[in-house]
Image (cartoon, rainbow, N blue to C red):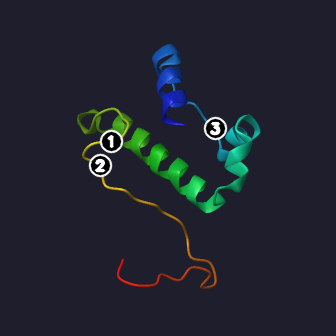
Amino acid sequence: MLADKMEHYKKEKKMLRNTPASYKKEYPWLKEVDSLALANVQMHLENAFHKFFREPSAGFPRFKSKKSSRKSYTTNVVNGNIFLEGKY
């Protein structure tokens, strides 16, 4: 998603409006992924771009570093469907 948005921004100087559904057509394996996690990724990416356009000092969105990034996963709990065991 970020690579597509970066490429489109460099060419058009406008934001690309796409959804996780459009990526599921191109990459069938994304159908196996939690849809709420994909929606959260899109939401975080949109927020990063909006912040960049409002506050250029925030910097252009970029990829996480493989060396020093924190592993994370964001999803939504619906009717108690997620339960964490142990210390997390």
Q: Which residue is mark 1?
A: 66
Residue 71, given in percent of the width and then of the height, sits at: 37, 56
Residue 18 got which mark? 3
Q: Hey, what amino acid is under mark 2? A: Ser
Discs 3, 2 touching: Cβ within 8 Å: no
What residue do we see at 53% from left, 17% from top? 12
Residue 44, given in percent of the width and then of the height, sits at: 46, 51
How many tags in the picture?
3
What residue do we see at 46% from left, 61% from top? 73
Question: Which of label 1 and label 3 is nearer to you?
Answer: 1
Please give left or right for residue 59 compared with residue 81 in the image: left
Residue 14, given in percent of the width and then of the height, sits at: 51, 25
Discs 2, 1 touching: Cβ within 8 Å: yes
What residue do we see at 40% from left, 84% from top? 86
Q: Secondary structure at mark 2?
A: loop
Q: Which residue is mark 2?
A: 69
What residue do we see at 27% from left, 43% from top? 67
